[in-house]
Image (cartoon, grey):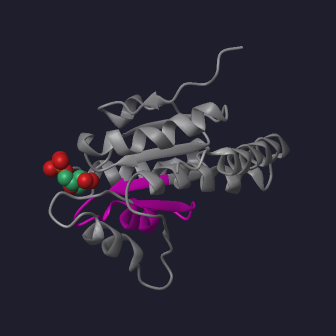
Amino acid sequence: MDEPKSAALPTDLADLSPEGPAVSVVFGSASDWPTMKAAVEILEDFGVACEHGVVSAHRTPDRLAEYARGAAGRGVKVIIGAAGGAAHLPGMIAAWTTLPVLGVPIKSRALSGVDSLLSIVQMPGGVPVGTLAIGDAGAKNAALLALRILGSTDEGIARKLDEYARGHGERALQAPLDR
Ligand code: RP5
C-alpha cells in the first residue's frame, strides 16, 4: 500500500477536498517551507495524512479565516501553523477554531526568530497556541506533538511513537565520541 502523501493546499480554497486529513501544516510564506518540510516528512513517515501550504495572516487574511473556520468540519484534528517575524498566523488560526493549534516560530532574517517566538508564545489567556522551539527543532517537534495528540486515541500511532522514541534513544547512546 502507498504511504499517504501530503496534499498541497489549492490556490482557491473552494477546491479543497471536503474530507480533510488529520493534520494540517500551514505557514506564512513559501520561504518557510524549507523549515516546515521536516514536519510534513515526519507525518508522512508515520503514515498520517496531512495537507500543507501557504496561509498568511497578513497577506491572505480572508484565506486564513476561511481555512481555519472550515478545518474542524473537514475532519482536521490538529493544525500546525508556522510563521516568522510578526508571526500572527497560529494565533489567528486559534482565534477562528477550537482545534489544537501548534505554533512554530520560523528563524527570521532580522532577529533570528526571537521576534517569531515572542509573537507566537504571548497569546492572551483563553486563546491557546502550543508554542514550539524556533526553526528546525520546532518543526520536527510540532509534527511529533501532533502525533502524540492523535496517539492518545489511536493505538497504532502510539505504538509507532514508542518505536521512534526507542530508536532515537539507541542512536544517542551509540553515537561515537571523537577524541
Ligand atoms: C511571515 O513573514 C512568513 O511566515 C515568513 O516567515 C516571513 C517572511 O516572509 P517572506 O518575506 O519571506 O515572504 O509572514
Q: In this view, does 16 lie above or below 174?
A: above
In the picture as drawn, the residue positioned furthest to the top comes out as 1
Q: Nearer the viewer, residue 29 or 142?
A: 142
Q: In this view, does 76 lie to the left or right of 25?
A: right
Q: Which of 32 and 53 is in front in this view?
A: 32
Q: Residue at x 77, y 47 (%)?
A: 166
Q: Position of residue 115 (x, y in %)?
A: 25, 71
Q: Does the magenta stretch include residue 132?
A: no
Q: Is residue 88 magenta?
A: yes
Q: Which residue is drawn at 22% across and 63% down?
A: 85
Q: Quadrant of residue 13?
A: top left
Q: In this view, does 88 lie above or below 8?
A: below
* Residue 137 can be seen, yes or no: yes
Q: Where is residue 19 in the image (x, y as percent from the top left)?
A: 58, 34
Q: Where is residue 140 in the image (x, y as percent from the top left)?
A: 51, 49
Q: Is residue 29 above or below residue 19?
A: below
Q: Is residue 42 left or right of residue 32?
A: right
Q: In this view, does 115 lie above or below 28?
A: below
Q: In which quarter of the image is the N terminus?
A: top right
Q: Is residue 23 left or right of residue 114?
A: right
* Residue 61 can be seen, yes or no: no
Q: Residue at x 68, y 56 (%)?
A: 149
Count all numbered tags in the image, as a single digit: 0
In the image, the segment drawn in magenta is 80-104
Q: Which of 142 and 61 is in front in this view?
A: 142
In the picture as drawn, the residue positioned furthest to the front comes out as 179
Q: Position of residue 48 (x, y in %)?
A: 64, 36
